[in-house]
Image: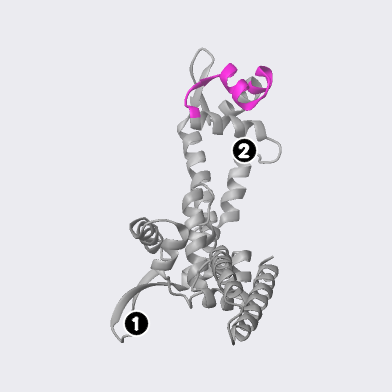
Amino acid sequence: MAYNVFDILKELDSIVDFARAKLQWDILFFIGSKGPSSVSEIADGTGNSKKAVADAIRKLIDKELVVKVKYDVYDLSDNGKQLLSRLNELMKNTVLTQEKANDDLSLLSTDNPVQYYYLLELLKAALLNNGILPIDRVSKELGISRQTLKYYIDLFSNKKIFKKVNKKNLLGKVVQVYALTNDGRKIAYKVPNLVKIRNNLFLKILLRMTFSVRYESALMKLMILFALTSPVIIYYKHLTGIYIIAILWLYILVFTSLLSIFAYLAMR
């Protein structure tokens, strides 16, 4: 920017002292937001006594920042409006750099919890799938339609979190998929839980074994698998060679149980 922030602050402070004239600033902000106001309204709005407000208004009139409209109703003068305009511009522009740096985190605002939830789930699924979104699996495990999921993907694509890329499938056919952008990765890497998931080798193995994108879904599939196969093994236990299958089944049960525990602990 073609201005010096500190010079402008110094100039504004010389007009209305930031440290010792807080009430004057409160009055300026109040009138600036509410419009012409009476002493009583300003006193109620700023939480000060009428006498203190009246004294501060007299000082603002002397500084030609406030003008009397009628009776005890006051409004900002042209100088007052210009002062607030400069202050607002200063705040907007000096915060701009920080907003830009934190723009990715602002996308994780909880103002819209639904968007927040889906963004985290999509980021997590992409991180665990080498940056590619497995749309079918995500829609099934989240319990939403492809159309609904596509709506959120497009929403986040407009914010440069995901992008369309061409990729060959197992049959060698080129298909379009959604992948994490560099900005999307920056967002994900600033969320502690997502960083833990990204570095969680146990979770990655568990999800690949169960063709899942979520820890909860992987556990559910394992529970269903063992619940369905255990009665079968018990029923056919008298058959020759069934003990080999039973031993393999037991090893898989122990292995996946330990894998699930380690994956859970690594996420904490």
Q: Position of residue 73 (x, y in %)?
A: 51, 17
- 217 sits left or right of 178 in the view: right
The residue wearing badge 2 is 16
Name the chief secondary structure element in magenta.
helix
Sequence-first disc among 1 and 2: 2
Which residue type carries mark 1? Asn
- Secondary-structure class at tag 1: loop
- 251 sits left or right of 160 in the view: right
Start-end of magenta stretch: 34-53
Q: Residues within 10 Å of mark 2 (few under 14, many from 20)?
A: many
Image: 42 above or below 10: above
Image: 64 above or below 44: below
Label 1 or label 2, whichever lies nearer to me, is 1
Image: 112 above or below 73: below
Residue 238 location, quadrant: bottom right
Of residue 78 and residue 240, the one placed in the foreground of this image is 240
The residue drawn where x is 51% and y is 55% is 117
Mark number displayed over residue 180 = none
The residue drawn where x is 58% and y is 78% is 205
Q: Residues within 10 Å of mark 1 (few under 14, many from 20)?
A: few
Q: Quadrant of the C terminus?
A: bottom right
Return the residue found at the far top.
Answer: 71
Mark number displayed over residue 169 = 1
User: Is residue 2 visible to us here?
Assistant: no
Of residue 98 and residue 136, the one placed in the foreground of this image is 136
Q: Position of residue 121 (x, y in %)?
A: 50, 62
- The Cα atoms of the two marked residues, 1 and 2, are separated by 67 Å
